[in-house]
Image (cartoon, rainbow, N blue to C red):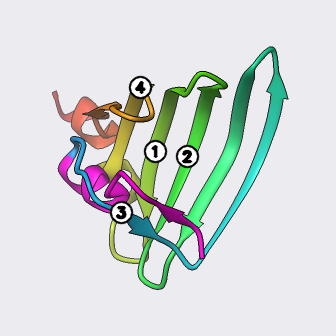
Amino acid sequence: MPKLETIGLSESLRDGELRRGSSQFGSANAAFACSHRVISLQQLHFVSVDTGIEASGTITFDGDADLKLQRFSASVPVAENAVHMTGPLAAPQIVRLESPVSRRAR
């Protein structure tokens, strides 16, 4: 089973900030390309029984990330759980992305 050892990914998406922990998923798949020491993720999906996480962006061979992540499930709209993760994978910065609904309401 796919497992992330240092980031509580579902908790980080829910809270909009980095949460330490681990994340285990039933399956994972990706569409990506590698060029010039950069992995470009067109689609990365982690799926568990009750939720899934999709990501896109880049990760360098030096371990620096620039990713947009969002949670999906039958009960949670994707736009309410989107974050931008940047910096080293060992200590990334996570910022909640504003939902399209919130932007229109202003």
Residue topped by disc 4: 86
Looking at the image, which is closer to me, 75 or 14?
A: 14
Question: If you read the primary sequence from the N terminus, does the residue marked by circle 2 or circle 3 appear first?
Answer: 3
Q: Which residue matches tag 1?
A: 69
Q: Is residue 2 magenta?
A: yes
Q: What number is the disc on residue 22?
A: 3
User: Disc 2 designates what residue?
Assistant: 55
Question: Mark 3: few, some, or many residues within 10 Å (few <14, many ≥20)?
Answer: some
Is 94 part of what is drawn in magenta?
Answer: no
Q: Nearer the viewer, residue 83 or 99?
A: 83
Residue 41's tag is none
- Which residue is at a point 72% across and 22% down the rendered structure image? 38
Residue at x-position 36% and y-position 63%: 22
Q: Relative to 87, is 41 on the left or the right?
A: right
N-term-proximal mark, 3 vs 1? 3
Displayed quadrant of residue 36: top right
38 relative to 15, above or below: above
* Distance Cα–Cα, label 3 vs label 4: 18 Å
Numbered range of the magenta stretch: 1-15
Precedes in sequence: disc 1 or disc 4:
1
Q: Earlier in the sequence, mark 1 or mark 2?
A: 2
Check whether the beta carbons of the residues at disc 1 and disc 4 lie within 8 A of each other: no
Q: Identify which residue is drawn at 60% across, 39% down.
A: 56
Q: Position of residue 28 (x, y in %)?
A: 65, 66
Front position among marks 1 and 4: 4
Given the image, on which type of amino acid does mark 1 rest?
Leu
